[in-house]
C-alpha cells in the first residue's frame, strides 16, 4: 500500500492531472489512394492526431502503431488512451490505423512510413520538430514500429522507438506465430523471413529504443526483445529495456497492469533523457 501511494504521488507530482491539448482530429492517410491497394476496400488507413497546447509543445511527436497480430487493432489501450500521457509532456501523439496485410506484406510498413511523412509535412503547422519524430508500437505493432526503425530512410526515418512486448523476429519458435502467418503467409520463403527479422537489421544508425514487457508473457516470447536489445548493444545504440516480473501480454495503458505506475515513470524519465 505504501509503495502504491508513493508511486501515485510521484506520478501526479510530475504530471498534471489534466492535459492541455487541442481537440483531436482524424485525417485519411492516403487521400488520393494508397501506394499499394489492399484486397479489402473497406480497410482504410487513417491517423488521429492529438496535439498538446502550442504553449507547452516541445516539438516532439510519436507515431503510435497499436497491436493486434496483423489481423485487427487494439486502438484504445494501445493507442488513443496514450494521448493524455504524451500531451501532458508537450509531445504530440499520432495514432495510426494501419491496414491489415491480407496477403500483401508490404502494406502495414507503407502505411507507417506515410504516417511519418505526413507528420513531417505538417510539422510547422503542428508545432513539431521534423527531426524529433519517433515511433511506438505494441506486440505486432511493435514489429511494425521496429521495421520502420530498422528499414526506413529519408523522410520516413524516425529518431527514436518505443516498443511494448514487441514481436521482433519472424523465426519459428521465437516469433508470435499468428503475427507471422498474417503478415508473411503460412509458408514464406527464407529471404522474406530474413527481411522481417528486425533483429538482423540493426545498425549503428538505428534510433535509440525503449522496450517494456512482462516476464510471464506467454504470447510473445521475451527472446524477441532480448535479441533486439543485444543487437542494439552490439551496434552501440542507446537502449533501455524493462522486464517486469508479471503482467502478461497486451497490458498497454491498462491500470490493471501491476507495474503500471512504474512503467509510466520510467518511460517519462527516458523521454526526458535525450
Image (cartoon, rainbow, N blue to C red):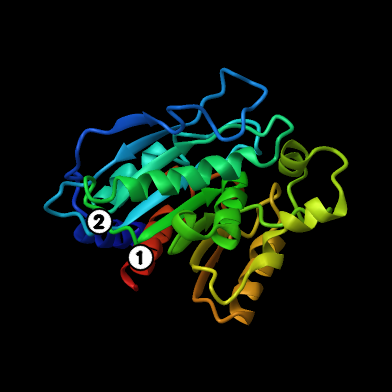
Identity of the residue drawn at 45% across and 27% down:
32
- What residue would you read off at disc 1? 271
Q: Quadrant of the C terminus?
A: bottom left
Q: Quadrant of residue 228?
A: bottom right
- What residue would you read off at disc 2? 89
Identity of the residue drawn at 53% across and 62% down:
211
In-image side of 194 versus 66 (left or right): right
CA–CA distance between discs 1 and 2?
9 Å
Q: For numbered disc 2, what is the local secondary structure?
A: loop
Q: What percent of the width, then of the height, locates residue 105?
A: 70, 40
Q: What percent of the width, then of the height, locates residue 101?
A: 67, 34
Q: Quadrant of the N terminus?
A: bottom left
Instruction: Report crowding for label 2: few under 14, some 14 to 19, many 20 or more residues within 10 A (C-alpha).
Output: many
Is there CB contact under 8 Å for labels 1 and 2?
yes
Pick the residue in front: 40 or 16: 40
**Residue 111: numbered disc:** none
Nearest to N terminus: mark 1 or mark 2? 2
Q: Quadrant of residue 187?
A: top right
Pick the residue in front: 266 or 107: 107
Q: For numbered disc 1, what is the local secondary structure?
A: helix
Residue 4 makes an appearance in the image = yes
In-image side of 209 versus 62 (left or right): right
Amino acid at each position: 500500500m505504501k509503495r502504491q501511494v508513493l508511486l501515485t504521488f510521484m506520478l501526479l507530482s510530475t504530471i498534471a492531472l489534466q492535459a492541455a491539448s487541442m481537440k483531436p482530429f482524424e485525417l485519411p492517410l492516403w487521400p488520393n489512394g494508397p501506394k499499394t491497394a489492399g484486397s479489402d476496400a473497406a480497410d482504410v488507413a487513417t491517423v488521429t492526431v492529438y496535439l498538446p497546447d502550442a504553449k507547452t509543445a516541445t516539438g516532439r511527436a510519436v507515431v503510435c502503431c497499436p497491436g493486434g497480430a496483423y489481423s485487427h487493432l487494439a486502438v484504445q489501450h494501445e493507442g488513443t488512451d496514450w494521448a493524455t500521457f504524451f500531451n501532458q509532456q508537450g509531445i504530440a501523439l499520432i495514432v495510426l490505423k494501419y491496414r491489415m496485410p491480407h496477403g500483401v506484406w508490404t502494406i502495414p510498413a507503407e502505411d507507417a512510413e506515410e504516417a511519418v511523412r505526413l507528420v513531417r509535412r505538417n510539422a510547422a503547422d503542428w508545432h513539431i520538430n521534423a527531426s524529433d519524430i519517433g515511433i511506438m508500437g505494441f506486440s505486432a505493432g511493435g514489429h511494425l514500429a521496429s521495421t520502420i526503425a530498422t528499414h526506413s530512410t529519408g523522410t520516413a526515418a524516425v529518431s527514436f522507438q518505443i516498443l511494448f512486448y514487441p514481436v521482433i523476429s519472424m523465426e519459428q519458435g521465437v516469433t508470435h506465430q499468428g503475427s507471422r502467418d498474417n503478415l508473411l503467409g503460412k509458408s514464406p520463403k527464407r529471404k522474406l523471413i530474413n527481411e522481417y527479422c528486425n533483429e538482423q537489421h540493426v545498425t549503428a544508425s538505428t534510433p535509440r529504443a525503449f522496450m517494456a514487457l512482462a516476464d510471464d508473457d506467454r504470447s510473445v516470447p521475451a527472446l524477441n526483445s532480448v535479441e533486439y536489445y543485444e543487437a542494439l548493444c552490439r551496434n552501440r545504440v542507446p537502449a533501455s529495456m524493462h522486464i517486469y516480473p508479471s503482467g502478461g501480454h497486451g497490458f498497454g495503458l491498462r491500470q490493471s497492469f501491476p507495474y503500471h505506475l512504474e512503467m509510466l515513470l520510467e518511460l517519462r524519465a527516458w523521454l526526458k533523457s535525450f
